[in-house]
Image: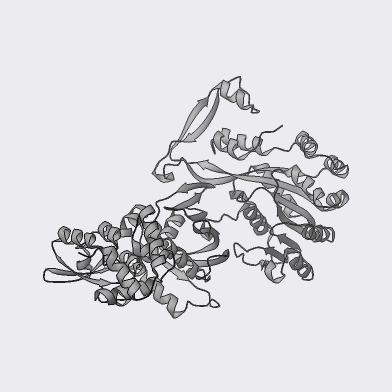
Amino acid sequence: MVSLKDRLTEILINNKLITQVQLEQALSIQKEKGGRLSDIIVALKFIKESELVSTLSEGLGLPLMDLKRFKIDPEVVKIIPIDIARHYQIVPLSKMGDTITLATADPLNVFAIDDVSSLTGYKINLIISSSQDIAQTIELVYPDSTKGVIDDLVKEMSASSIELVREESEILPSDQELNVMSRQAPVIQITNMILEEAVRKKASDILIEPFSKRLRVRFRIDGILYEEKSPPKNIYTSIVSRIKIMSDLNIAEHRLPQDGRFKIKLLGKEVDFRVSILPSSFGEKVAVRILDKSQATLNLEKLGFNKDTIISLGKVAKLPHGMMLICGPTGSGKTTTLYSILKLVDSPDKNIVMVEDPVEFQLEGINQVTARPEIGLTFAASLRSILRQDPNIIMIGEIRDYETVDIAIKSALTGHLVLSTLHTTTAPGAVVRLVNMGVEPYLINSSLVCVVAQRLVRKICPHCREEYIMKREALESLKLNIDTSKDVRFFRGKGCTNCFNMGYIGRIGIAEVLLLSSAVRDLILSRAQEHIIKQKAREEGMRTLREDGLSQALKGITTLEEILRVTAPDE
């Protein structure tokens, strides 16, 4: 009896598709690592899979079929379980009497055919197709393969509630892309449900990350990443392609980073999504920023700041000229605070212009410019043009270099109110950063009026909040500025259905506000170090981030753990 290996090699060598030397190399690898000989030959690039499938079809006398053109009866699919179909890479196509027709990429694997025959009780009739076609068809014809994941992911949602919103200027996908989209209904459903679940949980970001053997989906909720139920790894590339199509990105580009955005209509409201795709070791990592306008609180008094901070910000915002800086790490709410200040001072008699990269929220009555460095529209170039528009108030998304800060300071000196952000951890640190960027101290004193450093901390869920007394020894070890002579009461959330058992729901801002007094200006002029400026400001009444946070924790608004997590100790 001729062995399967001999049958395969006879067909390939007789058709001069591989040489005897190549065959020996493939056999050696098979002996060492195992696996299907046909897969090894294709992996070694001795022959293309399409040529191999065509040759096997001709050599074995079995028909070759393109499964994309074949409509499969859902009842026939139920004959073979999905785990068997995936294991043997077979797809049931039709049934006639006591015979079923199977599509396979490995027709020489008689052990698989015998196993399926004994399992189902049917006689087997074979046709040949490529392994790629088989894998794609399995995911299409077995809707239950993803149903379990979808049901766990979103038990109370309907994918039909999502509608992609396209602007008039956007380019629609090509016919070929639309055909791919229409054939990947499960992928569209999973992608939509991931987006809907993120919006329902009020997440700010979605991370879709590929690894060697699995796919990880995480949501950033109130600043903390939580891992969610993840779809199967084998449909990961389809999910990424779906997101690319929604964002009008190049689905054929896998080597370079891409950025885009799209909008969906969800449960009667429009939600904007900003997409960043980054090539990684195991594929493309997708980061989606959710910009839900209905969740945006652009009201200074509702951001959670204490009354003194709100009063200080309100006074500075009404000054005729000068510069205000908001500081903090990425995701600390700086942009939201700036937007809220702009909404506070916006009026018909003021010309307000802002430049961002990119613009996050559209504000009615405010002129917004999106910086595009790739075409030369940088922050500095935008500012030069903005100054010719005779603005009263200028907002700059971020000060990144000397050129930008130079124009910003000159704008503040020439009668404009300038608002911007800077990446520093403390308010006194922003002054030192400006000096290090090359700004002369006398220019800082002449233009800068206020620096705010802020953080976002999670609020305790009001539905499951409980009180507890912290041990005196623990408080003393933390070296907090709290009177430990009597019991100190803090609060925490036990976790309930309202907060998804997290104990927290929503976030508020804490801040330290540095107002440039004459004493602080003298220190800046002498190029004093950060800790000296901070010490003088605290003597004049500045409350640090740690102190502001502790006051919120003692009120029962947040937890002590949150304050220790986001703030640094005071020296």
Q: Measuring from the top left, give residue 455's x and y in whole percent.
A: 62, 45
Q: Measuring from the top left, give residue 376's x and y in whole percent.
A: 72, 70
How many labels sit on residues? 0
Q: Residue furthest bottom?
A: 175
In the displayed structure, 432 sits above or below 289; it is above
Left or right: 219, with 34 as reference point: right
Task: Answer with the quarter of the image where residue 141 lies.
Answer: bottom left
Query: Measuring 41% from the left and 71% from the top, which residue is drawn there?
Result: 47
Residue 380 visible at all: yes
Q: Measuring from the top left, give residue 433's x and y in whole percent.
A: 77, 48
Q: Measuring from the top left, give residue 430's x and y in whole percent.
A: 75, 47
Closer to the camera, 370 or 69?
A: 69
Query: Measuring 81% from the left and 57% from the top, which residue is drawn there?
Result: 409
Residue 70 visible at all: no
In the displayed structure, 280 sits above or below 176; it is above
Q: In which quarter of the image is the N terminus?
A: bottom left
Picture colour scheme: one colour
Task: Answer with the quarter of the image where residue 533 lies.
Answer: top right
Query: Measuring 40% from the left and 57% from the top, which residue is drawn there?
Result: 233
Q: Quadrant of the C terminus?
A: top right
Q: Residue furthest front?
A: 20
Left or right: 1, with 34 as reference point: left
Task: Answer with the quarter of the image where residue 546 lies.
Answer: top right
Query: Measuring 58% from the left and 65% from the top, which residue is drawn there?
Result: 256
Q: Residue furthest top?
A: 485
Closer to the camera, 441 or 242?
A: 242
Closer to the camera, 202 or 32?
A: 32
